[in-house]
Image (cartoon, rainbow, N blue to C red):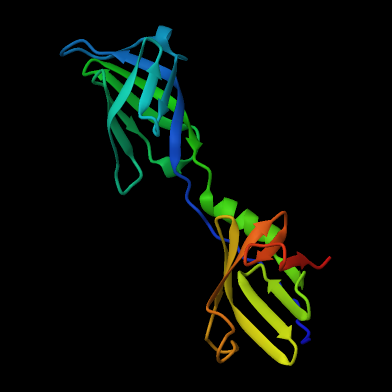
Amino acid sequence: MAAMGLLATAAASATIRSPVGLQCTAVTTWACAEAKTCKRREGEAKESYSFDLVAKTYQAPHDRGAITAFETDDGGFMTFLLSGGPRYVHKNVDAGDPMTSFLYMSSMDMRELRCNARYAPDASAVASGASRSLTGHYHLLGVMETGSELLLRPDQSFVWFMSYGAADQAAEGKWRVDGDAVLLEAGTGPGAAAEPAFRQLRLLIDHGALLLNGTDKGRYERHA
């Protein structure tokens, strides 16, 4: 069987998180009489407000209801309407926590809030973590008279080799986690086999091992 050398390179990617909720505290509130200067009302400071951007609901100290409209502009500013009528304007979500926000109860009643965002799980980070846990050098077990090795590199490239009797097959390309499986996609670029043994090969993930054809009869176990 041909020997395969290990090659590992680090890979990193930057991702942008999407806020799915806001937890806010009132810093100052203003009451504005018509044609008069607005006055601060300290008694209502430190009240809590929460906004669920997935369920489209909000909860205020004396009110709760639905978020009836929601928009985000190119600059990352969020604006939405509440069922009771107030228009909530949120600072650019990329500005970090806590974020300054403004809640207009009416044209004469405004709150300045400090908000911390709750973010959705970073799907790419989850996939990246799963990929890191699967990198390594694998050997095929459970198939008689057949030898096979698979190298999953951290840079998402792979090398695969199989020997059956006098016949040898090989493939190189890119790999990725696809649901509950590892998907190998063979390439045809420089350095790749002129005619790879397959274009795509799907290996089911099973407690750190990879199952050929989804059965234990062909099982790639990682070499320690």
In the image, 143 versus 139, the foreground residue is 143
Q: Residue at 37% across / 9% down in the picture?
A: 62
Q: In the picture, residue 29 is in which quadrant? A: top left
Q: Residue at 78% across / 76% down in the picture?
A: 144
The percent coordinates of residue 219 (x first, y second) are: 73, 66
Q: Residue at 70% across / 57% down in the picture?
A: 133
Please identify the quadrant where the N terminus is shown: bottom right
Q: In the picture, residue 192 is in which quadrant? A: bottom right
In the image, 71 versus 215, the foreground residue is 215
The percent coordinates of residue 104 (x first, y second) are: 28, 21
Q: Is residue 17 left or right of residue 65?
A: right
Q: Is residue 7 visible?
A: no
In this rendering, the answer to whether 205 lies above or below 71 is below
The percent coordinates of residue 38 (x first, y second) are: 27, 14
Q: Is residue 73 left or right of residue 59?
A: left
Q: Outermost residue, right direction?
A: 224
Q: Outermost residue, left direction?
A: 35
Q: Outermost residue, top direction?
A: 43
Q: In the picture, residue 85 is in which quadrant? A: top left
